Image: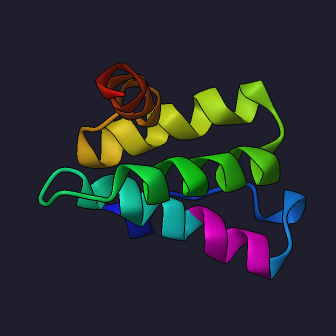
Amino acid sequence: MIDDIIIDFELFTSEEVGLIYSFFRLIEETTSKRVNPLYLEEEYKRYRTIINSIRLEKKYDAMVKKAIGVSIYQTMVTLKRAK
């Protein structure tokens, strides 16, 4: 479950934490319903701007995959291939 994921709160503002969890929930939604690809891509760019670290991206991707069984990276690769 997404709410079980613990991110590095000291690295982000409370607004950024909210946006990160919002993005995680959006990724979770891709498992149960169709999500607008343009919106997903736009939110992914915002997420990456906030994270601003490949190490953290990989860490959070692994945590999301463990929590809901979906990789952020693989989701975005699939989206780009579909274009």
**Percent of width and height locating residue 30:** 24, 52
Find residue 45 and report its horizontal and vertical position in percent: 67, 47
Q: In the image, what residue occupies the spot 84% across and 64% down?
A: 12
Can you say whether 2 is above or below 70 in the image?
A: below
Q: Is residue 20 above or below residue 58?
A: below
* Horizontal and vertical percent position of residue 66: 33, 38
- The segment highlighted magenta reads 15-20
Q: How is the image coloured?
A: rainbow
Residue at 42%, 26% (x, y): give it: 80
Q: Residue 42 colored magenta?
A: no
Residue 18 falls in image quadrant: bottom right
What's the residue at 17%, 50% (across, down)? 31
Q: Tell me: 51 left or right of 18.
A: right
- Was residue 16 drawn as part of the magenta stretch in this picture? yes
Frontmost residue, 76 versus 52: 76
Residue 49, x across and y down, in percent: 80, 48
Q: Nearer the viewer, residue 72 or 37?
A: 37
Quadrant placement of the N terminus? bottom left
As drawn, which residue projects farthest toward the front? 83
Question: Left or right: where does residue 57 sit relative to residue 49?
Answer: left
Magenta: main secondary structure equals helix
Q: Quadrant of the C terminus?
A: top left
- Tell how many labels: 0
Q: Residue at x 30, y 56 (%)?
A: 28
